[in-house]
Image: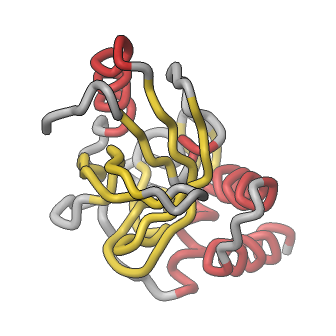
Amino acid sequence: MKIDQHNFWVFGYGSLMWRPDFPHIDAQRARVHGYHRSLCALSTGHRGTKDKPSLIVGLDRGGACIGRAYRVAPKQTEEVAYYLRSREMKSGVYEPHHITIVLPTGEKTKALTYAVCRSSPLYTRKLPFGRQVELVLQGKGMSGTGLEYLESMVAHLDEMGISCEQLRAVLKQALIQHRS
């Protein structure tokens, strides 16, 4: 995938929105059409195990998604691209895509993002609501539990003024079941 070093943007829809961990010269709210944020990927390392995976967010086809776009300085594009490949492609559930994003000014530009790979065995498609809750509750991996992940995701989306009713509903039910 060829990178435009003079106009390199990265689109984050999950933890990249609040923890990019790479150098950037600009960060803006952005919208993408043709993809949506969804609980559609299994975590078998950070938030779960192979025997008890958890459910995490992926960018899946269809709809629209609001996230954060980061512009990277030309001299840092290769370093950032390498870092993102290392971070996002470990499990095989994500794959790189160049997508069109819309910035708050209405300007459209290309950005690199990591969407779910629908052929990955870790891609779940749309699971029944109860199964989503079950997977969130069962997962515990090297970075914590699936419930902690979802709580953090919803809290950060709230801080950014981004509504995601699907995530909120799963979190609400998971918290009810966790407390009982």
Residue drawn at (59%, 64%), measured in percent from left and top? 136
Q: Is residue 161 above or below residue 149?
A: below
Residue drawn at (25%, 50%), measured in percent from left and top? 98
Q: For residue 169, what is the image quadrant? A: bottom right
Residue 38 visible to the viewer: no
Residue drawn at (85%, 74%), measured in percent from left and top? 180
The residue nearer to you, when weighing 44 against 162, is: 162
The N terminus sits in image quarter: top left
| Number of numbered discs | 0
Position of 134 compared to 4: left or right?
right
Rendering coords of residue 42 (x, y %): 40, 58
Residue 141 visible to the viewer: yes
Rendering coords of residue 138 (x, y %): 58, 61
Position of 22 compared to 109: left or right?
right
Residue drawn at (47%, 88%), measured in percent from left and top? 128
The residue nearer to you, when weighing 140 against 31, is: 31
Rendering coords of residue 33 (x, y %): 40, 72
Q: Residue furthest top?
A: 75
The residue nearer to you, when weighing 131 against 96, is: 96
Image colouring: secondary structure
The residue nearer to you, when weighing 73 against 10, is: 73
Position of 136 compared to 10: left or right?
right
Rendering coords of residue 112 (x, y %): 33, 44
Q: Residue furthest right?
A: 179
